Amino acid sequence: MMWKIVLPVLAVGFSVGVAGLIGGFQDIDVNDEGALNALNFSVSNHNRRSNDIFLSQPAEVIKVQRQVVAGYKYVITVRMAKTPCRKNATEDVCDIHEDPARAQPYQCIFTVWSRPWLNDTRVLKEEC
């Protein structure tokens, strides 16, 4: 009779522990192709929406997490910095200012939903 009480409690505890992992966010490599595509999309969107006349670029990717949903949801934490390139310029390569005072580094967290088979990528949230 004691086993009937203990086993369900253990089974419930175990299933809750496992369920917390399934469908949750997982840390992934910052060089993951999908993550890099999501980052590039986010940075482009960020630059379009900002009021700054100069472009910003990622200085360092701090952390990337991915969740499997109807596609992939990425949460990308990145340190951004300003460049000397104006938004309307046509330069292909635009490096970050070497002088930290001009680079004005700041951190952003981008939440991106990607459904590559539909060619659909959306920035769900941007916190800078």
Image (cartoon, helix red, strand yellow):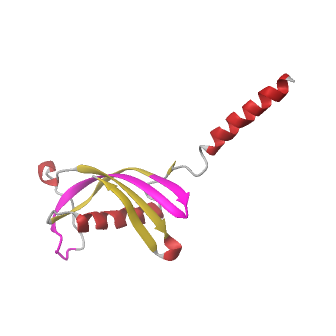
Q: Magenta residues, as a range?
A: 65-91
Left or right, residue 98 beside residue 66:
left
Q: How many marks?
A: 0
Is 68 within the magenta? yes
Farthest residue, direction right: 1
> What secondary structure is the stretch in magenta mostly built from?
strand
Residue 32 position in % (x across, y down): 47, 60
**Relative to the observer, which residue lies in front, 107 or 29?**
107
**Could you say which is closer to the camera, residue 43 or residue 62?**
43
Which x, y percent locates residue 8?
A: 77, 33
Left or right of 90 on screen, residue 125? right
Q: Quadrant of residue 31?
A: bottom left
Q: Is residue 69 above or below residue 10?
A: below
Which residue sits at x=12%, y=53%? 102
Q: Residue at x 63, y 45 (%)?
A: 19
Q: Choose top left, top right, bottom left or bottom right for residue 47.
A: bottom left
What residue is shown at x 55% (from left), y 58% (from top)? 68
Q: Quadrant of the N terminus?
A: top right
The vertical placement of 13 against 45, above or below, is above
In this rendering, is residue 119 above or below 6?
Answer: below
Which residue does the image show at 24% across and 73% down from the upper left? 92
Residue 29 part of the magenta-drawn span: no
Residue 51 falls in which quadrant of the image?
A: bottom left
Q: Position of residue 88 (x, y in %)?
A: 17, 74
Measured as percent of width and height from the top left, residue 12 is found at 71, 36
